[in-house]
Image (cartoon, helix red, strand yellow):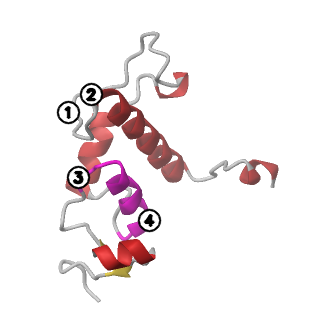
Amino acid sequence: QKLQDLGFSWSLRDSIFNDTLLALKIYNDMYGSSKVQRSFVVPHDSDDRWPEALRGFALGEKLHKVKYLGTFIKNRPDRQLRLEELGFDIPPRFAVVARDQGDRQAGHNRVVLNENEEN
């Protein structure tokens, strides 16, 4: 219970998504963009802005899988929104959440079925 209270995730998939999100945030802070080249790997050098646990993390490859395979985000509007908040573009074929200005101001999300999904 103590680990859960600290935010520890028992799911490898959740852990990798959280690492991807953290690495994207740091990348965005450093370079002012969420457009990451597929070949980008978090450097192993001594740049203190990168946590040691993320050094060598293949961020570009992870985001490529998000964008082209829907890894981590299929039917997960919560994850889609977290990525969008960092400026990452969710491909329309995977997007399941639509927000308009009124909903955003009120703090409400509308779930929209993806045209490519069966009911």
Q: Is 109 located above or below residue 24 in the figure?
A: below
Residue 119 vs residue 105, the one in the foreground: 105
Q: Which secondary structure class fits the magenta region best?
A: helix
Q: Earlier in the sequence, mark 3 or mark 1?
A: 1
**Distance CA(mark 1)–CA(mark 2):** 5 Å
Residue 10 vs residue 108, the one in the foreground: 108
Q: Earlier in the sequence, mark 1 or mark 4?
A: 1
Is residue 45 rendered to the left or right of residue 118? right
Q: Is residue 104 magenta?
A: no
Q: Residues within 10 Å of mark 3 (few under 14, many from 20)?
A: some
**Which residue position holds label 1?**
37
Q: Report the residue at 49% width, 46% height from top.
A: 18
Residue 88 vs residue 65, the one in the foreground: 88
Q: Position of residue 83 (x, y in %)?
A: 36, 53
**Distance CA(mark 3)–CA(mark 1):** 12 Å
What element does badge 2 sit on?
Answer: loop
**Which residue position holds label 3?**
67
Quarter of the image with the N terminus is bottom right
Q: Earlier in the sequence, mark 3 or mark 4?
A: 3
Write down the region rendered in magenta. 75-89
Residue 78's disc is 4
Tag 1: amino acid: Gln
Contact (Cβ within 8 Å) of mark 1 with mark 2: yes
**Distance CA(mark 3)–CA(mark 4):** 16 Å
Contact (Cβ within 8 Å) of mark 3 with mark 4: no
Q: Earlier in the sequence, mark 2 or mark 4?
A: 2
Q: Residue furthest bottom?
A: 119
Residue 99 in view: no
Q: Position of residue 116 (x, y in %)?
A: 18, 77
**Distance CA(mark 2)–CA(mark 3):** 15 Å
**Which residue position holds label 2?**
40
